[in-house]
Image: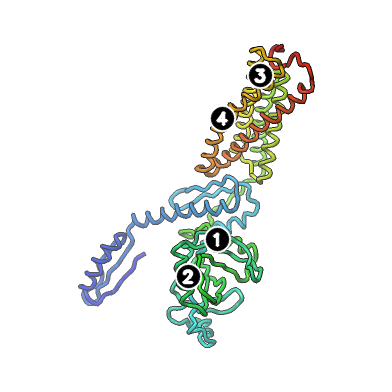
Amino acid sequence: MSIIVRFRDTETRARARRVLADNVPDLALADAGDAAAPRLVATIRPEAEQRIQEFALKQNITTLNNRVNELGVAEPVIQQQGADRIVVQLPGVQDTAQAKKILGRTATLEVRLVDEENMTPTALTAAQQGQVPFGTEFYVERNGTPLLVKKQVVLTGDRLTDAQPGFDSQTNEPAVHLTLDATGARIFRDVTRENVGRRMAILLIERGKGEAITAPVIRTEIGGGRVQISGRMNTQEANELALLLRSGALAAPMDIVEERTVGPSLGAENIRKGFLSTAWGFAAIAVFIVVYYQLFGLFSAIALSANLLLLIALLSMLQATLTLPGMAAVALALGMAIDANVLINERVREELRAGQSPQAAIHAGYERAFGTIVDSNVTTLIAGLALLVFGSGPVRGFAVVHCLGILTSIFSAVVISRAMVNLWYGSRRKLDAISIGNVTWK
């Protein structure tokens, strides 16, 4: 693609070429034509074109990540494939049509002034027939009202810092509440102060085509950087518009070239394998702990079962999609959870060897092991939080289950196992022996 510029003479062309070469180094310039009709042909350099394409691809990946996070998809995978493709994997998505609609839209927001001077019936009729006045564009509001809007853009969506769906406080209609940055708030305040009584159009531009969402009359100066968009939209449209504006516009339009849906058979197989690995791991730990610590081992195994139940309950409350990394985190949480019970049981055995009575050994074992349990789990929790903050995709899913598993393991080891021990031994006035190993300590 090239741009051809015609000049009056070769001297003017030479000056223009020097200016363009100094200010736009990405253009390759070539002279064309003769002295009577000199021309300059400008073509973008291949390396500049590749750099722009790579930047647009990276920007689109960032925007898609923002939009996917807004959809609430668990452990998405968004990565570059080749020079001009992006692979998006969305586990747990039920409405694929809605997801494609959100991901593929390139909507940007523009704020412009309505051309009040040309808003006459004659001019509007001519504009509908294609005869638009110079410097304006023809739009139709959602309520069917024709508009002539100036081409000069007052404000764009780049100045947005936040966009949240809500309702109009006066009409109770769905609306989108926008928050502008400092520069955007200043521009909007100055424009509204200078154009009180005139109309301001808020346009949604997508793939080169614009839609006039609303064109309210400016009643007074609007400061503070808070703007509201409303006008014949339902709640779903308000949510979608807020999501698009909040996550940012795509740097380049995208089209879906291939779509695959993983059937339930593969998902069921993964779930079965994950369940079996967790079940066998749990069984192996329970058998070992019961054989080694006898009755106290049984208490630990019951506490471990409660830990697993609490973890699954928390994931269900969060509406989390349990994928393979999540299942791996569950298995790891079970393996780590037994450490707290081992610390408690070994501490109780040490107190017994030191000559403490069984009741005193139980009390000292739980009290003195608690600090060690908290210290060891806090350090592991810090590592999990780091994965959650700095990780993405499957790493974040693993980190969520891992952190929840640490919290439930502390609770189950300290509270549930202690409750069972107290229930079994606490009611006895005189306790001569407890079962906590290969022998019964007295």
Mark 1 crowdedness (10 Å alpha carbons): few <14, some 14-19, many ≥20:
many
Residue 76 versus residue 246 in the image, above or below: above
Q: In this view of the protein, can residue 188 be seen by the observer? A: yes
Judged from the image, the secondary structure of the residue bearing numbered disc 4 is: helix
Please give the residue where the numbered disc 2 appears in the rendered image.
Answer: 189
First in sequence, mark 3 or 2: give its number: 2
Judged from the image, the secondary structure of the residue bearing numbered disc 1 is: strand
Tag in front: 1 or 4:
4
User: Gap in Å between the C-alphas at discs 4 and 2?
Assistant: 54 Å
User: Gap in Å between the C-alphas at discs 3 and 4?
Assistant: 19 Å
Please give the residue where the numbered disc 1 appears in the rendered image.
Answer: 163
Q: Quadrant of the N terminus?
A: bottom left
User: Gap in Å between the C-alphas at discs 1 and 3?
Assistant: 57 Å
Q: Amino acid at mark 4?
A: Asp
Residue 81 versus residue 379 in the image, above or below: below
Q: Nearer the viewer, residue 105 or 265?
A: 105
First in sequence, mark 4 or 2: give its number: 2
First in sequence, mark 1 or 4: give its number: 1
Question: Residue 375's mark?
Answer: 4
Where is residue 86 drawn, in percent x and y? 49, 51
Please give the residue where the numbered disc 3 appears in the rendered image.
Answer: 348
